[in-house]
Image (cartoon, coloured by chain):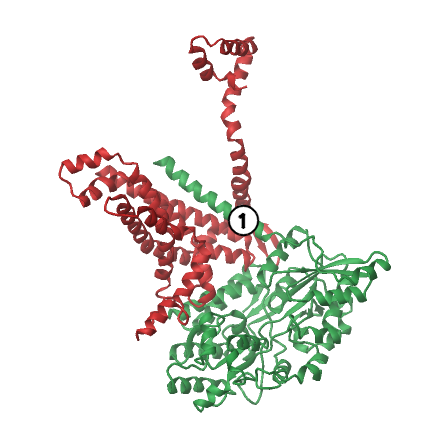
Amino acid sequence: MDSSSPVALRTAADEPGSGDVTIVRSEAIGRTAPGSGSRRWQRARRASVPYLFLAPFLVGFAVFMIFPLIYAFDLSLYRTKIVGGKSFVGLENYAKVLGDSSFWEGVRNVLTFGLIQIPIMLGVALIAALLLDSVVIRGKTIFRLGFFLPFAVPSVVAALMWGYMYGQAFGPIAQISRAVGITPPEFLTSGTIIPALANISTWQFAGYNMLIMFAALQAIPHELYEAARVDGASGIQVATRVKIPLIGPAIVLTAIFSVIGTLQLFNEPSVLRAVSPTIIPPNFTPNLYVYNLAFTNRQFDYAAAVSFGLALVTAVLSSLVLFVVYRRQSLR
Amino acid sequence: MRRRTSRTAFTALALLGLSLSACGQAVSPSPAASAPASTAPGASPAASAAGPATEITFWSWVPGIGDQVAEFNASHPDIKVNHESAQAGNAEYTALGTALQTGVGVPDLVQIEYQHLPGFISRGDLANLAELGAGDVKDQFVEWTVAQASQGDGIYAYPQDAGPMIMMCNKTLLDKYGVAVPTTWDEFTKAAATLHAADKNVYLTNFTADQGHFFGLLWQSGARPFTVDGQNIKIDFTSPEVTRVAKLWGDLMNSGNMSPLDTYTNDWNAALANQTIACWTAGAWGPSLIESAAPDLKGNWQVYPMPQWDASKPINGNYGGSTIAVTKASTHPKEAETFARWLNTDPKITLDLTGGNANLFPVTKATLSNPEWSGAKAEFWGGQETHKVMADGANQVDVSFGWSPFTGFVYTTYAEELTNVRAGNITFEQAMQNVQEKSTAYAKEQGFTVQE
């Protein structure tokens, strides 16, 4: 019975002439009155109510997150040899991760990718959000939808689509180039593969980040704009001096999400590997490496250790972004 | 701030957990684990008439093999084979590995490619068919195919099909530029230069990055990258036979006389169709790919033997093909062996499997020399008796070539090194040196004794 909630009782009882409620109250008191032991029981029960509501989530969280994590961690402490079978090796797999050039090469690739892609994508998203928020644009809904649409395309499909666009024979870019008599640019080469992938991710996720920033912009009280205009600020000044600082937390959020997303890069290189196997190695990104360790080499235990290594790198980088951002803010 | 950081870290860990749990699902044995697959309508009455038949499970990814399973079930009332279509290659091995580890849903019979057999043999996953009488039929197979499935005195699988290497060339295109079809690798390199010099848009060939292709080339050079004897292993990626293959393709890449396109891509198909790539070396299954890529060039293409390193001592390699093994966990190894033997040695069945959807390349001497198969005139190939060229190639495959028990690792490492070669960071020979070092370290880590 929820009527045992003290808050509910008090508000109900404060209402004049609510006889029914009084009865409920007396019932509640009557039920819990005798002894201090049952008061403790009542308190415990009261405290347990939030957890009861949280239970469905907590169960799911334990089954689908905590348990796999423990399982994976347990796995990472063993090594299964072809000759000699499974044995406990403690943190040996982790020591191996530290010296694994294949892993760090992948980390280096995603970092390079992130350094190029994240600023461009967030820049595009911010400009688009500011434009949509400004008064000068007509047909905002269409633009907003159109810009967001690539996010609805599954990343595997997006990669296939861009793989076709980048193609040297059938790709529209190559065909147009040939039609106008210039050598078609090559997109899938060792030197251009990271920008080519960055382009796909930017196309896909700029709209999503734009939407987060746009939502934050909508929440800014209009009095601030009026005040700025009274002070003689131009449209651009309003954007740079009022809007951007106020949606700072939203931008930080998108940056963190992007860092995490970047380190998890998998689908796009995995799909493009089929069309350029000599350009994208099986350890191109840490996730791709983990996948190959587990499903090609059948090294599930080491794959688990590398996964935790990747998680650690992700945690460190995310903290670093937060640290840099907040430090700069406190200095200002 | 601190709270948020830790939450972010936790989110990252949680995401990781999610992806791992997703992996766990993917690993679980094939979705059809309990569903009895294609059983012929005619099979069940026969089986029920003779009382309860022994049921065995068979994993295969050969399209249309259910027909042969049905035929077996009809003619063998005491055994009922349940065919479960598996996903090709790694996907099946992953499912098999999980089944073996947990002991749940292990099939009695399983399709395994040649290069992955040693891994399963070393782990003790496969039954020794020699103990079930495989010695009686082993001479019916082309020698090297049995050698691939053997270790010591044991025979761990029956060869099902193979991919002896051949070279396919657009003869009309080569003729147009007056380039003779190369018969040696020396001529091959020269032809690549001549052709590209004659027309800068035309190339003799491109590089096939697929690992099986490169190891087929090593095989064809007489290289022995791995020699396995129980827990002892010898690794050799620095022999002259390996080095000359690496150097040839590395030089071709740098010379600009080879198309930079990757095999099996749309661009590659287009290049075959618009006649900018003239030749392709592949397994004997290659012709169907040319036929579908360049249907308009019917009559222009021909099948040739592989170019040789030493024309006086022709050697061939293999690229593709599978075996049928009986698992050690099988509770009916005798029945399983009966089916595997029947499927891979019965003259009618092995001939049937060369056609239809299966389209397998035969590995029994009888079928290879069966005029019904070997005398077939290939319409697309200008009526050429292509099977004769392939059969000759099959008989020249080096018997002594062996794989490591960790082909997955070797393949991944090779692919990694290849991208470095392609990026110009290292030479192809250096890549081989790296494969040597990494494989050696891995073999030791996996408990093998590596002979230096």
- Taking the image as drawn, is residue A284 in sight? no
Q: Colour of chain A?
A: red
Tell me what residue is drawn at x 46 percent, y 44 percent.
B13
Q: Is residue A187 left or right of residue A40?
A: left
Task: Name the spot of residue A124 as percent of width and height, x first.
Answer: 29, 51
Instruction: Determine which quarter of the picture holds residue A105.
Output: bottom left
Q: Colour of chain B?
A: green
Instruction: Determine which quarter of the picture holds residue B41.
Output: bottom right
Please give the chain letter of the residue carrying mark 1. Answer: B
Task: Name the spot of residue A86 as percent of width and height, x first.
Answer: 60, 52
Q: Is residue A255 above or below residue B77?
A: above
Q: Is residue B241 left or right of residue B6?
A: right
Q: Is residue A235 above or below residue B71?
A: above
Task: Name the spot of residue A45 as percent of width and height, x first.
Answer: 53, 20
Task: Name the spot of residue A304 as percent of width and height, x first.
Answer: 51, 50
Q: Going by the picture, which residue comes out furthest to the front? A: A139
Q: Quadrant of the N terminus of chain B?
A: top left
Tell me what residue is drawn at x 24 percent, y 37 percent.
A330
Find disc 1 in the rendering and name its residue: B22
Query: Observer-nearest residue: A283 or A62?
Result: A62
Q: Is residue B277 left or right of residue A83?
A: left
